[in-house]
Image (cartoon, coloured by chain):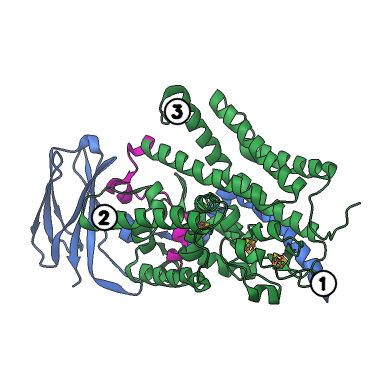
Chain colours: A green, B blue
C-alpha cells in the first residue's frame, strides 16, 4: 500500500489516476469546445486531438508521478502552435508578418503579457495604456491579457512561466535538445539581470511613454510580428530581435540546457518572480532527506536551486515551478508545497492541488491556439496553404 | 496556530483552482469590468486623442482631434494634432483641409494630401506648427499627424 510520504515519490494508482483524469476530461471538454462541436471536419479533428493530447498528458503526469517531462511536451507544443497560428492569422489579416503603420494608428496591434510591466507606471500616473492595441475585443485585447495575467498570478505566481506563457515553451524545448550541456559553468549572478532589465524598461517606458522592450529588445518579435524595414533604426531593431532570438532562445538553451532567455533576460519573468511571494504554492526541499548530491542544482533550467537553497530548504524566488528538480531528485526530497502546511506533509495532496490549478490553466489557455494550429497544419497538408 | 495556517493554506490552494476556472469562464465579464472600473484608455499618443471637431464635406468628413502634449507628469514641450478623413470611398483624389487646432477661430495650418501618392504638403500659418510627422492610409480613410510646439 502506498503511503502519502514515500521515499521517492511515485504516481497515483491506476484507479485514482482515472478518476482524477476524468475530472480534467470533463472540464477540458467543456472549455475546449465551449459547448459545441465544430461543423468543419478539420475543426472537429483539431478539437478531438487537442482534447486527447491534454488528457493523455495529464494522465501520464498523475500516473507516473513525473511532472516536468510531460509538462514540457505540452508547453513546447503550445509555443510552436502559437507561432503557426499567429503567423497564419497575420498573413490572413494583413498579407504579411510585418506590422503596418495603419494597424498602429487604428490601435489594432495584438497585446501580449510581456508589455504589462511597462504599462504599470503610466497606468498609475496617467490612467492610460501606452500601447496601440484594442482595450476590449479584437485579437489579443489588452483587458483580456490583464485578466489572464491577474488570474495566473493569483493561482500560480511565477508558475506562469512553466505553465502558461506562450513563448516559454520555445527555450524550454531547445534546452532539451542535447543530453548533456556543452557549457556547464554559468555565473549564478546572471539571474539578477532580468531584474535590471525590468527596472530599465519600466523606467524608460514611463519616461518616453513607449513600450521600449517591445520596440528594442523582445526576441519573440522574430517569430511573431515586426515593423517592415524602412529605416536604419528599424534595421537595427530587427537585428537585435533576431540576434536575441537565435542567441537566447535557440543556441544558448541548446548549449547550456537552461532556459536562458527566461532566466537571464525577460523582464516579465522578473516581475512574475516577485509574485511568487504572494502565491500559495512553492517548491520545498526536505532537509532530512536531502543527501546534497546537487543533482537538482545541475538540472534547474533557471538556476533557481543553489547550495543555499539546500541549506534553507527553499528555492530562489525565480523558481518557475516546472517540477524538473522534483522529477530528478534521487531521494524524493523535493516537492510541491502549500504555504502554511508541514514539510514533507501530504506531498501528494500538495502536488495534486498545484497540478489541477497549473494544468488546467495551461490546457484551457492553450486550447484554442493548439486547435487553430492543428487546423492550419491540416490545411497545409490538404491544400498546400495554411491560410484561407 | 500551525493548524489554522495549514487550513488557510489548503483553502487558498483550493481557491487557486477556482480562480483558474473563473479567469477563463468570466474572461469577457472581467475584462469589461476591469476597463470600466479602472477608467483606463489607450494613451492619446497612440489613439490620437479625443475628436474635438468634425467638419462635414459631403461625401466625407474631417475629424480634428485635440492637440496632444501628454507626458507622464504634466505636458511636454512638443506634441501633435491628428486629423482623420473618412470614409475612404468618399474621399477626393486630393484632400485639402484648413485646420484650426486650438479652437481660437483662426486657421493654424492647411494640409493637402494626394491620396494617390500619399504626398502631404503643409502650409504653416501659426508659428507653433512645425511639420508633418506621418501620413498614413487606414482601412477607412487617411490620417495625418502634424507636429506642434507648446505655446
Ligand atoms: S520568462 Fe518571459 S518569456 Fe519566459 S516564460 Fe516567463 S514570461 Fe514567458
Ligand atoms: S537532488 Fe535531492 S538529494 Fe540531491 S541535492 Fe537536490 S534535494 Fe538533495
Ligand atoms: S527550482 Fe525546480 S521547480 Fe523551480 S525552476 Fe528550478 S527545477 Fe523548476
- Mark 3 Cα-neighbour bin, 10 Å: few <14, some 14–19, many ≥20: few
**Same subunit, tags 3 and 1:** no
Measuring from the top left, give residue A3's x and y in whole percent: 88, 57
Name the quadrant containing residue B126.
bottom left
Residue marked by disc 2: A234
Measure the alpha-carbon separation of dots 1 and 2.
Answer: 57 Å
Q: Which residue is drawn at 84% across and 61% down?
A: A5
Mark 1 and ligand 3: say if the CB distance to the nearest ligand atom is below 8 Å.
no
- Chain label for disc 1: B
Relative to A90, say whether A253 is above or below: below
Residue linked to disc 1: B4
Residue A313 can be seen in this image: yes
Q: Quadrant of the C terminus of chain B?
A: bottom left
Quadrant into which the N terminus of chain B falls: bottom right
A296 lies left or right of A12 = left
Residue drawn at (76%, 66%) of the image: B9
**Region rendered in magenta:** A92-120
Residue at numbered disc 3: A380
Amino acid at each position: 500500500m502506498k503511503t502519502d510520504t514515500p521515499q521517492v515519490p511515485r504516481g497515483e494508482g491506476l484507479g485514482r489516476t482515472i478518476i482524477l483524469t476524468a475530472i480534467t476530461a470533463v472540464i477540458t471538454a467543456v472549455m475546449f469546445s465551449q459547448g459545441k462541436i465544430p461543423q468543419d471536419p478539420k475543426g472537429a479533428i483539431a478539437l478531438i486531438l487537442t482534447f486527447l493530447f491534454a488528457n493523455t498528458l495529464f494522465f501520464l503526469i498523475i500516473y507516473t508521478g513525473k511532472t516536468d517531462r510531460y509538462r514540457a511536451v505540452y508547453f513546447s507544443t503550445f509555443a510552436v502552435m502559437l507561432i503557426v497560428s499567429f503567423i497564419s492569422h497575420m498573413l490572413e489579416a494583413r498579407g504579411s508578418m510585418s506590422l503596418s503603420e495603419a494597424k498602429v494608428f487604428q490601435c489594432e496591434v495584438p497585446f501580449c503579457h510581456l508589455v504589462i510591466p511597462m504599462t504599470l507606471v503610466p497606468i498609475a500616473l496617467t490612467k492610460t495604456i501606452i500601447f496601440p492595441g484594442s482595450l476590449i475585443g479584437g485579437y489579443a485585447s489588452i483587458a483580456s491579457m490583464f485578466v489572464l495575467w491577474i488570474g495566473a498570478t493569483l493561482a500560480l505566481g511565477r508558475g506562469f512561466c512553466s505553465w502558461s506563457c506562450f513563448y516559454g515553451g520555445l527555450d524550454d524545448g531547445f534546452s532539451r535538445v542535447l543530453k548533456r550541456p556543452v557549457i556547464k559553468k554559468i555565473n549564478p549572478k546572471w539571474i539578477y539581470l532580468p531584474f535590471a532589465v525590468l527596472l530599465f524598461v519600466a523606467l524608460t517606458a514611463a519616461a518616453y511613454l513607449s513600450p521600449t522592450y517591445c520596440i528594442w529588445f523582445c526576441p519573440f518579435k522574430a517569430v511573431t510580428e515586426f515593423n517592415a524595414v524602412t529605416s536604419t533604426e528599424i534595421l537595427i531593431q530587427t537585428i537585435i530581435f533576431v540576434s536575441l532570438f537565435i542567441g537566447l532562445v535557440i543556441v544558448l538553451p541548446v548549449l547550456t540546457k537552461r532556459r536562458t532567455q527566461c532566466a537571464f533576460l525577460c523582464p516579465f519573468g522578473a516581475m512574475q518572480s516577485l509574485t511568487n511571494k504572494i502565491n500559495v504554492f512553492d517548491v520545498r526541499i526536505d532537509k532530512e532527506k536531502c543527501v546534497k548530491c546537487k543533482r537538482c542544482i545541475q538540472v534547474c533550467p533557471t538556476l533557481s536551486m543553489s547550495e543555499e537553497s539546500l541549506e534553507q530548504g527553499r528555492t530562489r524566488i525565480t523558481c518557475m515551478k516546472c517540477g524538473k528538480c522534483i522529477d530528478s531528485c534521487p531521494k524524493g526530497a523535493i516537492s510541491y508545497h502549500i504555504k502554511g502546511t508541514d514539510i514533507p506533509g501530504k506531498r501528494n495532496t500538495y502536488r495534486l492541488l498545484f497540478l489541477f490549478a497549473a494544468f488546467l490553466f495551461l490546457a484551457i489557455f492553450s486550447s484554442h491556439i493548439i486547435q487553430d494550429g492543428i487546423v492550419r497544419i491540416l490545411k497545409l497538408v490538404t491544400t498546400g496553404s495554411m491560410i484561407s | 496556530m500551525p493548524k489554522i495556517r495549514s487550513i488557510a493554506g489548503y483553502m487558498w490552494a483550493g481557491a487557486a483552482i477556482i480562480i483558474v476556472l473563473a479567469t477563463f469562464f468570466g474572461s469577457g465579464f472581467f475584462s469589461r469590468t476591469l476597463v470600466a472600473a479602472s477608467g483606463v484608455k489607450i494613451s492619446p499618443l497612440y489613439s490620437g486623442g479625443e475628436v474635438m471637431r468634425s467638419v462635414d464635406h459631403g461625401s466625407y468628413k474631417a475629424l480634428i482631434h485635440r492637440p496632444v502634449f501628454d507626458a507622464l507628469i504634466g505636458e511636454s514641450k512638443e506634441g501633435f494634432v491628428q486629423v482623420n478623413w473618412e470614409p475612404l470611398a468618399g474621399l477626393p483624389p486630393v484632400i485639402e483641409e484648413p485646420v484650426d487646432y486650438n479652437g481660437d477661430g483662426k486657421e493654424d495650418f492647411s494640409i493637402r494630401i494626394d491620396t494617390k501618392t500619399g504626398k502631404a504638403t503643409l502650409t504653416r500659418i501659426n508659428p507653433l506648427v512645425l511639420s508633418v510627422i506621418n501620413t498614413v492610409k487606414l482601412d477607412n480613410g487617411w490620417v495625418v499627424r502634424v507636429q506642434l510646439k507648446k505655446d
